[in-house]
Image: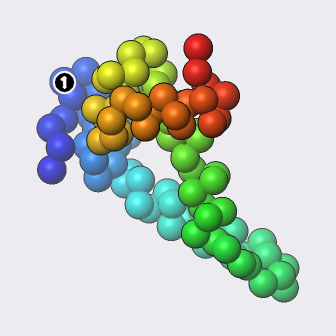
Amino acid sequence: MAPRKKTGQWSAAGIRVNGHELPLRSHAERALSDYFTHLEGSHPADLYNLVLREVEEPLFRVVLDYAEGNQSRAADILGINRGTLRKKLRLFGLAN
């Protein structure tokens, strides 16, 4: 389990709001359930790639913001090397 920040409660499992843990997994499950509910008879395809496209860019944007633009710190938070981070930032148009 990841350590908890002293200034705000967080962990790899989720965040705490008003003393209640809101795991990232629950949010993802709810979003996917909503997606299937709103298909209205359409048949999903290539869902894995769709989810990655929808999640990856905001993940990099939020982590970079959390790291206050420090790419080395953002790469550490993401668990990737800085070269990979820079490549993704260029891909998403987030590079300085």
Q: Nearer the viewer, residue 5 or 92?
A: 92
Query: In the picture shown, does residue 21 fall above or below 90?
Result: below
Q: Nearer the viewer, residue 17 or 91?
A: 91
Q: Is residue 66 left or right of residue 37?
A: left
Query: In the picture shown, does residue 26 fall above or below 18?
Result: below
**Residue 58 seen in the figure:** yes
* Residue name at image x 29 percent, y 27 percent: 8
* Residue name at image x 61 percent, y 64 percent: 49
Quadrant for the C terminus in the image:
top right
Mark 1: few/some/many CA within 10 Å (<14, 14-19, 20+): few
Q: Residue 95 at x, y = what percent?
A: 58, 21
Query: In the picture shown, does residue 69 fall above or below 5?
Result: above
Q: Nearer the viewer, residue 15 or 53?
A: 53
Q: In which quadrant of the rendered view does residue 51 lie?
A: bottom right
Q: Nearer the viewer, residue 10 or 69?
A: 69
Count of picture labels: 1
**Colour setup of the view:** rainbow
Q: In which quadrant of the rendered view does residue 16 lie?
A: top left
Query: In the picture shown, does residue 9 fall above or below 71?
Result: below
Q: Which residue is mark 1?
A: 6
Q: Residue 80 at x, y = what percent?
A: 33, 40
Q: Amino acid at mark 1?
A: Lys
Could you tell me which secondary element the residue under label 1 belongs to?
loop
Q: In which quadrant of the rendered view does residue 63 lie?
A: top left
* Residue name at image x 31 percent, y 23 percent: 73
Q: Is residue 33 left or right of residue 63?
A: right
Q: Is residue 88 left or right of residue 18?
A: right
Q: Residue 20 at x, y = what percent?
A: 33, 48
**Residue 20 seen in the figure:** no
* Residue name at image x 59 percent, y 41 percent: 57
